[in-house]
Amino acid sequence: MAGAGLEEFRRRWREELAQREGPAKRRLPAGPEWDERRRRRQRGNGEGPAGAAREPEPVSQWGICGAVRAAPEGAPAQPAPAATGYFELAKSLLEGGECPLASPAPWTAGESSCSGRGRDSEVSQVPEAPQPENTGGDRLLEQLIRDLNEINEIPFFDIQLPYELALKIFQYLGRTELGRCAQNRNGAVSQLQYEFGNVLCDVHSCDGVVIAGYTSGDVRLWDTRTWDFTAPILEPMHGAAEPGSQPHVSFVRINNSLAVAAYEDGTVNVWSLMIGRDPVHCYQHNLKIQALALSLEGATIATASGSEVRVECPNDKGYWETAAHFEIQKLVNFLHLIPDTGRHPVAVAATEDVVYLLKAENPSRVLHSVYGQPVTCLDVSSKEAAFGVKSLGWMNEGNKILLYSLQTSQCLTTLGSSLGDFTCVNLRNSPPHLLVTGNKDRRVRVYDLRSSTSSCSLYAHQLGVSAVQMDDWKIVSGGEEGLVCVWDQRMGNKLWEMHARHPVRHIWFNTHSLITANIPDEKSPRGASILDDDLTAHRRHRGIIYAYEFSMDQLALESILPICRSSYDEVAGYNYNIGLAVPYDNI
């Protein structure tokens, strides 16, 4: 009986396949029984007694086992054959019901479902009732799409569909769709949270090591290069106030050897990543600190408080000392240290509408000053400084990005002319001769410094762009609405996005990792005061740090479809997701 039921299932499947192959390849069985079935099917489809078929309509629906079949453009489509019950079978299984092809008797322990995967099943022959066209097809397609959207780490095409059927589906997908399919295949997302820190104040990262400061005064490290992200909580200077009474952390910075935190009371703590959790240096400003900078390499720190800029670094004997001290007439809004300057630190500071070049053992020098044109963002490289200026007044020429040479103090080029303010600029991490910016007009722009033109403009974030970084082909941007987007600048397309509450204030990525931080603007939200029963802030007020890892080997290479792991030169595996967003890209 089991063999007869399986043969009946196969026979009916072959009949449907033959019907969909077209008149030229259709092989219909002969005999009085089949003539009677065909007449019943014609009556069920609404055909006349003379066998005149209805006017065919274009077909674009799920065919055999989920494969998509669409009528070619400009050509008449074949009439859709009557449903033979397989959509009803799938629908019944999805709804948790019994198999429509099964006998009324309940399943026994030795019986199995009618999937036909090398197992016997008891299937009884039931009269075939006429059914309307495309029964359940659209609903099953919607269900399939919803299932795909819910899957993050389990690859659908390796588990749920046969290999050959997946290839048939891929034939109808373009490069963008193939890339999107591949993006769901691999990668791990981790949330870096510190429950006792209350509200997140500032985040910085360097080569996968993340530092975060909180309203509780705690400073926490995570090393995303290790499997468990273990890293210490950095202790404040000995003799400080009791735990729980520490001032809020204003800024944090980290490089390969040092971690630095500036507090609201003007205190600056410096830790060595090589020796313990206690600070190796500490100094104090009289006023609140407005800006903090740490050299990419080495041990040079710059802080701005009020009109004072102070540069600290160890001397030849290893003792910390003040290397330079500058007095500026206005409050400093932006501060950066120039990399690769040798023993004499060089800093660039921006006040409301003046940009200064600060060299140790030399007086401060004005790099740019135009009254009524505030500086809105700043970034530096070893030879250049780029900053955004806002144009006001009756001679409003649009907001621009100015690029200055640090050697000659001359303006090299003027970029853009936007109605919105430039909110962020990234020169240091951009490829040679390129610069990426974010603007309040919701756009991310890439400028070619050789031609002073925009090579790419992307409509990115509804509330404005807050952070941005790029490499040779992809751009990662963060917005005030909390959205993180990854773009392919060559195609001008968004590859994927991730949303969280609060603005995105920090972005860092390399070939296989991405770190983002959503930092709330409100550091003392309602419901987190000392008068409340719960002294900890609610999770939605705290902010969040995400660490994405795209090199996780979750599957064997053999299980990946060749179309997802081929290149122009040879068949090779991928680091997926970001790298596979456009086919044939190798990281």
Image (cartoon, rainbow, N blue to C red):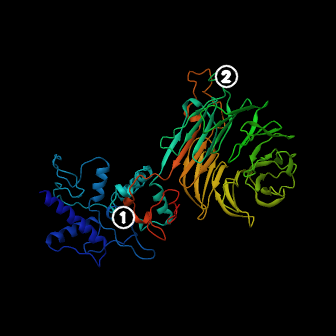
Q: Position of residue 20 (x, y in %)?
A: 31, 70
Reply above or below: 365 against 58: above
Q: Nearer the viewer, residue 451 or 174?
A: 451
Residue extending furthest toward the front:
317
User: Which residue is at a point 76% across and 32% down the rendered structure image?
Assistant: 288
Q: Is residue 267 visible?
A: no
* Residue 7 x %, y %: 17, 63
- In the figure, residue 268 lies in which quadrant? top right
**In the picture shown, does residue 524 fall above or below 42?**
above
Residue placed under numbered mark 1 in the picture: 67
Residue 501 seen anywhere in this rendered image of the structure: yes
Identity of the amino acid at label 2? Ala
Residue 76's image quarter? bottom left
Q: Quadrant of residue 171?
A: bottom left
Which residue shows up at 14% across the image and 56% down it? Answer: 2
**Amino acid type of the residue that numbered disc 1 sits on in the rendered structure:** Ala
Query: Residue 169 at x, y = what percent?
Result: 39, 64
Secondary structure state at the residue bearing disc 2 = loop
* Identity of the residue drawn at 74% across and 66% down: 450
Horizontal arrangement in the rendering, residue 358 relative to residue 443 (left or right): right
Q: Which residue is mark 2?
A: 241
- Element at label 1: loop
